[in-house]
Image (cartoon, rainbow, N blue to C red):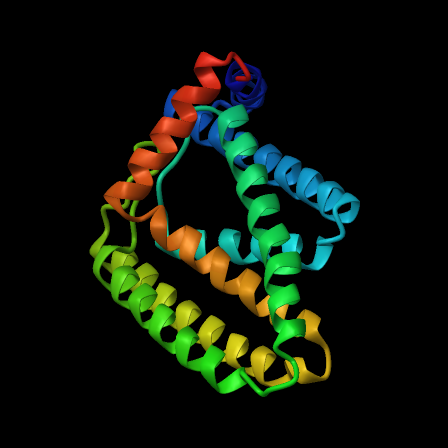
Amino acid sequence: MENVFYRIAYVIGSKNGFDDERIKVIAYGLMALSQTIGIFILSSVLGIIFGCLYESLAIFFIVGFIRKYTGGAHATTLISCMIISVTVILSMSAVARYTFSFVFKQLSVIDIRIIIIIVYVLIYSLIFITVFKLAPVDSPNKPIKKPEKIKRLKNGSRIIIISLFLSSIVLVWFSKYNYRFFTVANSALFATLWQTLTLTKTGHKLINVLDRFIRIKKLD
């Protein structure tokens, strides 16, 4: 499928007199755009089917937004990336929507918001430390070489993590009015955890294992 995007980019580049490097950049951009649209559509449709649309959309947008600043592990092909992304989004959104909402409803007789907030503080602290040390993680296709860009991405990623933490705390606090605030807050937490995992060596190994599995099963 990547060859299709390269051919399209080659046609565009030939008409405009672009060199091979510029054509590769165009092909990469087209592939990234189609990948994003595909993941969005699949995540939305499956989210509607399984009743976790809000959670799916929250995870989709948060992961995408954080990834722009932190980078992270990549699958080797477009299809592999889409399969992994949609599977992760749907799995996390379903857990956030049903498992945690069930627990929240069962414990609604007591106010557990303070306990939840303390847990959030601990988890987000670990996330912040990991992002502080590792971000940004570039890819072979788009290496980050300029020190000023690295600094900008690193600072941006910290601001995003802090903003997500504060937003999640607000959602948890007001979840007594609507428990879906709690499920969306958990979706934000899961999305941030997943994206942070992709910065680590463990995350890279996990993506590689999933990527190889998809290729062996000829799903790609």
Q: Quadrant of residue 182?
A: bottom right
Q: Nearer the viewer, residue 38 or 98?
A: 98
In the rendered image, the vertical position of residue 213 relative to residue 35, given as above or below: above
**How many circles with numbers are drawn on the protein?**
0
Asked if residue 19 shows in the view, the reply is no
- Residue 137 shown left or right of residue 61 in the figure: left
Quadrant position of the N terminus in the picture: top right
Q: Nearer the viewer, residue 213 or 28?
A: 213
Residue drawn at x 37%, y 66% is 156
- Residue 165 shown left or right of residue 4 in the figure: left
Residue 17 position within the rendered picture, expressed as x and y whole percent measured from the top left: 49, 22
In the rendered image, the vertical position of residue 43 relative to residue 216, given as above or below: below
- Residue 24 shown left or right of residue 204 in the figure: right
Q: Nearer the viewer, residue 196 or 21?
A: 196
Residue 53 position within the rendered picture, expressed as x and y whole percent measured from the top left: 72, 54
Residue drawn at x 54%, y 83% is 112
Residue drawn at x 48%, y 64% is 189
Residue drawn at x 50%, y 30% is 26
Residue 166 position within the rendered picture, expressed as x and y whole percent measured from the top left: 48, 80
Asked if residue 209 shows in the view, the reply is yes
In the rendered image, the vertical position of residue 100 relative to residue 77, given as above or below: below
Residue 184 position within the rendered picture, expressed as x and y whole percent measured from the top left: 62, 66
